[in-house]
Image: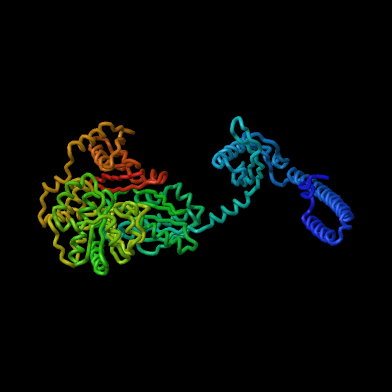
Amino acid sequence: MPNNKGFFKKMISKTKIYLAIIAILMIIISIYEPRFIMPGVLIYLLIVMYSYWTNNKRNAEISKHIQDLTLTMDSTAKKTLINSPFPLVIIETDGNIIWKSSKFVSEFANIDINHYLDDIVKELKQSIGQNNNEKSKSIQKQIKIGNKTYKILGEYVKSKQDDRKKQSEYMSILYFIDITESVKIHKKYEDARTCVGVVMIDNYEEIMQRIATEEKPQVLAQIDRSMYEWASNTGGILIKSDRDTFVFVFEQKYLEKLRENKFDILDTIKEINIEGRFQLTLSIAISNEGNTNYEKYRSALASMDIVLGRGGDQAVIRENGKYTFFGGRTQEVEKRTKVKARIVAHALENLINHSENVLIMGHTNGDIDSMGSSLGIYRLVKSLNKEVNIVNNTFGLTLHSFMEALYQDEEYKKAIITKAEAIEKTTPNTLVIILDTHKKNYVEVPELLDLTNQIVIIDHHRRSTDYIEDAILTFQEVYASSAAELVTEILQYAEVEVNLKTIEVESLYAGIMMDTKNFTFKTGVRTFEAAAYLRKFGIDIIKVKKWFQSDLNTYNTITEIVKNAEIVNDTIAIAIYDKEDKDAGIMCAKAADELLTISDITASFVLGNVGKKVCISGRSIGDINVQVILEKLRRRRSYHFGWSTSRRNDNRRSKTRTNYQN
């Protein structure tokens, strides 16, 4: 008799149950009638054997049926593969083609398909290398072959294992699905989408006031003609919504043309001849982000704020959450009117009065400009009898002497607080005033931005793309020499009487001095007016200059950096400070400034090692915009940076300075 375990294993579950029930019944009968034991055993054995025979017969029939079905499916699958309407290829990861369909051969008869297959195999190997433990994985890729676009679908599977080389070999069936028409329809749809732009004439009011009355119609006609001719090349609509503002609507397909021409309208407008050496410039903001034209218009308006914050004479495209800038070669023009300063001063006082408390902070590794302007705003808030603190955790090398002098005043020992204390004091009704920066990741304590609904920004730098968007009041003037200059104007027009302490006056004056390089660069009429206002309070100039003095070791380090600089294209100096130093940013900035004192050098770049990051300090004196150069670096890598800009208004020469940290 066969092994019970194997014997009964072959039987289906119901048969086993029936046999068990019969066995139990026969045992019961045999107990009551012993004479039925032998006949019962014989009958039971016959039943078991019959069950075994019928079970085997049933299994054989099922197996034959499955085999026939499998053969049919295999035959169908083979015919389907051979006669597939899609080009089909079976390929190994070593590039060996095992089989290709007739459709594949005819489809790519006049094309060197091996070149494309090599690229696919390379990507396949990279994907397998990243997922070495997976037995199979789907493949999906879009590729252009000749004049057609194909979507490649497939799945690679492990074919065999080479134990000697400890490598696995894979093979894949790839389907080439022609999606050319689908791609064309999608592109046609994308090209037909609407782009909305806002075009603004910079300093329109001031230029119109300065030119002769009889020239105004001619100048305006030239501007309008140039603008409408430019818009007509895109088949778009240009509508004049205000005296100095146009709304521009056009199809997406012309956006690339504008990009290729680098917005030549910027140069066309500059060429309009106006007596008195005035130069017209444009600011352009274009966006295709939004589900409706109104949303795109709002996005363009928000982008225009960035353009104006960067000094105008620029175009920006906002697309897929990113900004692309064009132009920006013209120096900022100082605005003579102080109407905005008066409005900001009154608005700021109103916000302070209605706030629970006030926190003031500048940028990380603060300098005398951010600290001096902080002290000026601190005194304004104290004059309004509001609780106020200055948040300061870090400051640069040049601020040590000043901080020592500041901490001699008992008031400021309590007024200046740390990050932890600032977070504890912040409520939704706290007014946070940010000075000398407008970037989210460059403020002293970025966490405060999420803890309050009231943020004020006072800054003089060209606006960056990572600016703080939800500020309720922004006073950002790129023509200004420093944040200290802007704060001084606010103090002049404050309705409350502000009695500045001597160190507060001297710090504001020092901030202007530092950013203008002792009133040499980017100084306008308003710069000197602010300085004259501060001088009335009495300033010890010698004391202020001592704050800027460097120790001998710092001076030697800077001269060593300058000594090892290399000159590129006869006018650009590049130097490296490779010693790991937490104050490398300050060293690089000073070295970059020093390099510009050398004749024929129009731009300088100094790279420094601050530990886990690399800082880049850029300076220029001339036509090179170092900010644009470093912003391109930033788009290639993730940068944390701080920068400032200063320009000289005389003789059309300029100096820009930019500091980046990566």
Q: Is residue 268 left or right of residue 211?
A: right
Q: Is residue 514 left or right of residue 472?
A: left
The number of callouts visible is 0
Residue closest to the eye, 472 or 93: 93
Question: Which residue is outermost to the bottom?
Answer: 354
- Splitting the image into 4 quarters, where does residue 337 fall? bottom left
Residue closest to the eye, 142 or 297: 142
- Splitting the image into 4 quarters, where does residue 565 fall? top left
Quadrant, the C terminus: top left
Residue 621 visible in image: no
Residue 30 visible in image: yes
Q: Is residue 94 left or right of residue 415?
A: right
Q: Position of residue 315 (x, y in %)?
A: 39, 52
Q: Position of residue 446 (x, y in %)?
A: 33, 55
Residue closest to the eye, 523 or 238: 523
Q: Position of residue 307 (x, y in %)?
A: 36, 54
Question: Which residue is outermost to the top?
Answer: 164
Please tell me which residue is depicted at 44% across the width and 60% down the height of the picture: 238
Q: Is residue 234 above or below residue 133?
A: below
Q: Position of residue 401 (x, y in %)?
A: 17, 46
Q: Is residue 57 left or right of residue 277?
A: right
Residue closest to the eye, 248 or 359: 359
- Splitting the image into 4 quarters, where does residue 83 fall? top right
Please tell me which residue is depicted at 50% across the width and 59% down the height of the picture: 194
